[in-house]
Each structure stands twice: as C-alpha cells, then as structure tokens.
Image (cartoon, rainbow, N blue to C red):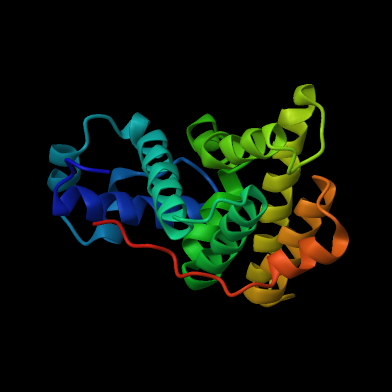
Amino acid sequence: MTGRTAVQKRIHEAALKLFAVKGSTDVSVSELADAAGVARGTIYNNLESRNDLFHTVAAQMAQEMDQRVVASYAGTNDYAARLAIGIRLYVRRSHEEQHWGRFLLHFGSTTESLQEFWSGPPMQDLMMGLERRRFEFRPEQARAALGIVAGATLSAIALVLQGLRTWRDAGSDAAELALRALGVPVPEAREIACRELPPLADLA
C-alpha cells in the first residue's frame, strides 16, 4: 500500500473501475489513460508491466481491505463477532463503492491475487475460533468453512448490487447464516449479525 505516487494511485483506481465495468482483465493503454485522465505516456512511465497491472491492483485491493477490516474490529476478541463484522463491512463497502463490489464479484472467487481476501484474517479467525471451540467443524474442513464465509459474502454483495436487498439486510443475513453454518446457535448468530456495525477504518 505504500510507495505509490499520486499518479500511480490514480491509474490503479481507474484500472480497478475498468476491470469492474468490463468484467475482464483486458484493458488497453488508451482506455486506461482516458479513465485516469492522463496521457498515454504517463501510463507507460508509471507501469512496469501492463500485463501485471491486474494482479497488482487485485493484490493491493485485498491488502488494503484486510488492513481496514482488522483495524475496524480492533479490541473485539470474539471470533464470531469478528467474522460477522468483516462480512458486513464487505457488503457495505460494495454498496458505497459499487465498482469495488463488482470487481470482487467478477474476480473474487477465481483470481489468485484476491485469495488474500479469504485466506488472510478470515481464515485466521476461523482457525482461532475452532481452537477456542467457538466454531464447530473438523480441521480438514477449514477450506470448506472458508468457502461458506466467502460464498455468503459474495452472494450478499450480488443481491445488493442487483437492488434486491439493502446492504444492511443482506450483510446481516449473510453473517447470520455463515455463523450458523459454523455452529453458532441460531439466536446468538442473529444477535451478533445485527449488532451496530463499526465504520470501516481508514488507513493512515
């Protein structure tokens, strides 16, 4: 997240929007220059490789969101509550920044660069919750459990972007159902999923 110039950040933000709108990683230099509001030469001067642009943007997106979610639930020691906060923050951000949500929908389940979304803090919270007996699944089911969390999150985002559910309802439902699947009792899962949601932390 550090080390990028203002121009590079602008180019990367434009690239993310283009990838999201097109649903494809094939973006030309001309398209990128137009979207970023810079000259073609500026694109060439600020990209080491256009072929690596998608993976660079995806990896930075995952790292940034991971850091912001972790900062948002700082001080929360309950792993069920941490997972619920993370799910709901993903859904809310997708409502507020729809290109961000569409990017995640298009590429979040298939792109190696985005696997940090799911294999970082969510997996760590799952495994710690299992160790502390907060969740109930066999250790060899960890990847399947993570798939439930990721799938519930992406499904909720899709419902929001299609205008079928509000981000509040979709996020709370996704969090509740994910927690129930992990062994949290129904009334408690619902209560956790409907708690006041902290704001998504900004990175200094």
Residue sitting farthest toward the top? 140
**Is 13 left or right of 76, judged from the image as shown?**
left
Camera-side residue of 32 and 189 = 189
Residue 146 locus on image (x, y percent): 69, 38
Residue drawn 18% across the image and 44% down it? 4
Residue 29 visible from this viewpoint: yes
Number of numbered discs overlaid on the protein picture: 0
Residue 21 visible from this viewpoint: no
**Is 69 left or right of 190, judged from the image as shown?**
left
**Is 95 left or right of 72, judged from the image as shown?**
right
Residue drawn 54% across the image and 62% down it? 89
> In the rendered view of the protein, which quadrant contains the N terminus?
top left
Camera-side residue of 186 and 159 = 186
Quadrant of res 86: bottom right
**Is 177 left or right of 54, judged from the image as shown?**
right
Q: Is residue 19 above or below residue 196?
A: above
Camera-side residue of 102 and 151 = 151
Residue 27 locus on image (x, y percent): 40, 44
Residue 105 locus on image (x, y percent): 61, 52
Residue drawn 76% across the image and 66% down it? 173
> In the rendered view of the protein, which quadrant contains the C terminus?
bottom left
Camera-side residue of 55 and 169 = 169
Residue drawn 38% across the image and 48% down it? 64
Q: Is residue 126 above or below residue 10?
A: above
Residue 120 locus on image (x, y percent): 52, 36
